[in-house]
């Protein structure tokens, strides 16, 4: 019998009998590695995917890496090894960048952005060779954020006013009322009735984000500026060391308070741009101000950073939330703000509840309740209730849990109501009661929780976003009580609000409700709930 002639790879290696290709296994691996070593050219639509936009808006390159790897355009999730090779990193380094704090080294950020071919106008820093003047001209010509009209809110409309400082223009935010009463419309490029023709723009759009970075808060139309204060703020943004003083810090505080009030109606993705702009201004100006102003400025910054952490929790970006909570703690320590330090511990305890880490949640709540923080009575009430929730999750006796809930009620009753912007001012009797209901659910008493949820939510005292969230918790209690149809109906109403205000936290709770309702999946109400939630 004639012997079959052997086949060889181009490298000279003899091919195995079961290898029907033209390359040996080693050459096949090298070819695959060579293809993976080349960063693909992606279309512009790639960067407009919601997950990618959110990652870019977080100013965290690790989140950008993760969004890039998991982008549906690739057809499959790219491994960390592949992306690490593109970025001249190893897998462990890339993993640390994705899961750790946001990288701050500008040289590395620029190199990575160049490697991935990220469009320059989507970045929160400037790449070499990108014309600043051209970008500025485009941005200044655009209207600023114009929010859709919520049911109970008046839409914000305003513009950027170029104020001349030392021979050059500094853009300062002007609200619609100032425009209307001062005749500044021709300078701003918008008018007081601009909202009538406005169409909704993505608050995370490249133009808006680029304007934030150029002038801090000067890219957002915000209320409360008279013409004299306008000039003063413009000077402060231009020369922080000389001009940034108490009145300007008070202006930053008003910006923060307005953002907090707007959040309940507008949702996190429309409030975040304002907060990122403010925090960018605080961080940059704090390096240049007089020492006497720095502590006051950082106190405002720590309050804003804590609020940014909450907003990122609401859109389910825990890494960004942790970053801002840590920044809030650092700034509060430098500002010698003991109460804010204790308050951040409370917020970290609440974040541990999001992650169902009962023990960490309890110990953080206990740490937040230490006398050293000198917390106001309203915040101490919230801390006490949080500790009760932790004990309920860990299976402590119901009497112990109820006792702590009673202590929280007593503390809240003693709290003054004279300052609507005080620390923890949102924690009202209605908020306490719906959180009591959550605690009762965790303690294994969902039927008691249902009645409490119904009483509070029927009063209509909560914000639009909070009503949606606590309805999700109410649906969970109903499902655990064996009421599938009512749970599904309440869940459907909650899902509509969650989609409207983009509350991923609410969506996550509703996903858990849907799992509880799985044994009733064929019922019409449950099917309708599933369709609404997944729409």
Image (cartoon, rainbow, N blue to C red):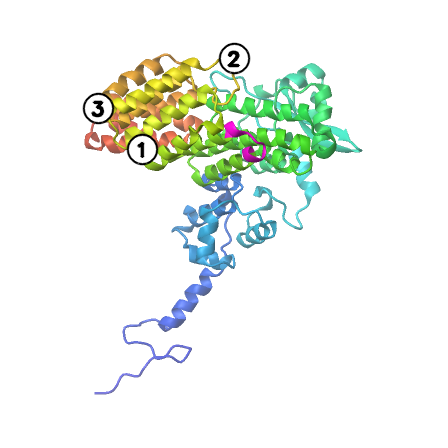
Identify the residue at image location x=45%, y=15%.
415
Q: Earlier in the sequence, mark 1 or mark 2?
A: 2
Give left or right: position of 101 versus 475: right
Place of residue 64 in the rendered image (x, y in percent of width and height, measured from the top left): 49, 46
Q: Which image quadrant is residue 467 in?
A: top left
- Residue at 43% of width from left, 23% of height from top? 380
Label 1 to label 2, Cα distance in Å? 39 Å
How far across and down, in percent of the image, does residue 388 sit? 33, 26
- Residue 336 in magenta? yes
Sequence-wise, which precedes: disc 3 or disc 1? Answer: 3
| Image side of residue 356 versus residue 89, left or right | left
Q: In the rendered structure, find residue 511 and report the number of the disc placed on it.
A: 1
Q: Secondary structure at mark 1?
A: helix
- Marking on residue 481: 3
For the C terminus, which image quadrant? top left
Badge 1 crowding class, 10 Å Cα cut-off, few under 14, some 14 to 19, many 20 or more, is: some
Range drawn in magenta: 332-340
- As for residue 371 lying within the magenta part, the answer is no
Question: Between tags 1 and 2, which lies in front?
Answer: 2
Closer to the camera in the image, 67 or 235: 235
Residue 124 visible in this rendered orientation of the protein: yes
């Amino acid at each position: 019998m004639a012997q079959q002639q052997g086949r060889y790879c181009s490298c000279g290696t003899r091919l195995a009998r079961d290898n029907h290709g033209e390359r040996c296994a080693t050459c096949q691996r090298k070819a695959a590695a060579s293809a993976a070593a080349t960063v693909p050219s992606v279309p512009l639509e790639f960067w407009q995917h919601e997950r990618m936009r959110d990652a870019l808006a977080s100013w965290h390159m690790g989140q950008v890496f993760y969004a890039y790897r998991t982008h549906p355009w690739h057809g499959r999730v790219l491994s960390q090894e592949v992306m690490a090779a593109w970025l001249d990193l190893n897998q462990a380094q890339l993993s640390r960048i994705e899961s750790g704090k946001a990288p701050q080294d500008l040289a590395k950020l620029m190199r990575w952005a160049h490697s991935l071919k990220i469009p320059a106008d989507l970045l929160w820093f400037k790449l070499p060779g990108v014309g600043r003047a051209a970008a500025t001209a485009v941005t200044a010509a655009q209207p600023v954020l114009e929010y859709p009209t919520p049911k109970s809110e008046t839409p914000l409309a305003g513009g950027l006013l170029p104020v001349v400082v030392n021979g050059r223009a500094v853009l300062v935010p002007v609200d619609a009322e100032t425009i209307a009463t001062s005749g500044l419309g021709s300078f701003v490029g918008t008018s007081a009735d601009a909202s009538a023709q406005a169409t909704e723009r993505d608050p995370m759009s490249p133009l808006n984000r680029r304007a934030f970075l150029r002038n801090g808060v000067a890219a957002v139309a915000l209320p409360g500026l008279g013409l004299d204060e306008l000039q003063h703020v413009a000077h402060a943004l231009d020369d922080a060391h000389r001009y940034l003083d108490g009145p300007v810090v008070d202006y930053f505080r008003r910006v923060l308070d307005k953002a907090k009030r707007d959040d309940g109606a507008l949702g996190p993705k429309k409030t975040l741009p304002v907060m990122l702009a403010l925090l960018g201004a605080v961080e940059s100006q704090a390096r240049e101000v007089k020492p006497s102003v720095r502590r006051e400025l950082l106190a405002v910054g720590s309050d804003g950073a804590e609020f940014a952490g909450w907003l990122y929790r609401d859109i389910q970006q825990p890494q960004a939330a942790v970053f801002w909570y840590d920044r809030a703690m650092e700034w509060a320590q430098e500002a010698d703000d003991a109460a804010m330090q204790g308050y951040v511990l409370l917020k970290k305890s609440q974040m541990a509840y999001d992650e169902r880490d009962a023990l960490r949640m309890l110990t953080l709540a206990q740490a937040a309740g230490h006398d050293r923080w000198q917390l106001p009575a309203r915040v101490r009430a919230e801390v006490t209730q949080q500790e009760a929730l932790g004990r309920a999750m860990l299976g402590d006796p119901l009497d112990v849990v109820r006792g702590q809930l009673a202590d929280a009620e007593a503390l809240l009753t003693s709290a003054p109501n004279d300052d609507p912007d005080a620390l923890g001012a949102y924690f009202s009797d209605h908020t306490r009661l719906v959180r009591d209901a959550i605690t009762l659910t965790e303690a294994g008493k969902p039927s008691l929780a249902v009645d409490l949820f119904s009483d509070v939510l029927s009063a209509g005292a909560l914000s639009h976003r909070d009503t949606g969230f606590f309805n999700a918790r109410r649906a969970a209690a109903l499902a655990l009580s064996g009421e599938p149809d009512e749970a599904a109906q309440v869940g459907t109403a909650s899902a509509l609000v969650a989609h409207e205000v983009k509350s991923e936290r609410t969506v996550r709770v509703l996903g858990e409700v849907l799992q509880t309702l799985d044994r009733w999946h064929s019922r019409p109400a449950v099917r309708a709930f599933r369709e609404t939630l997944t729409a």
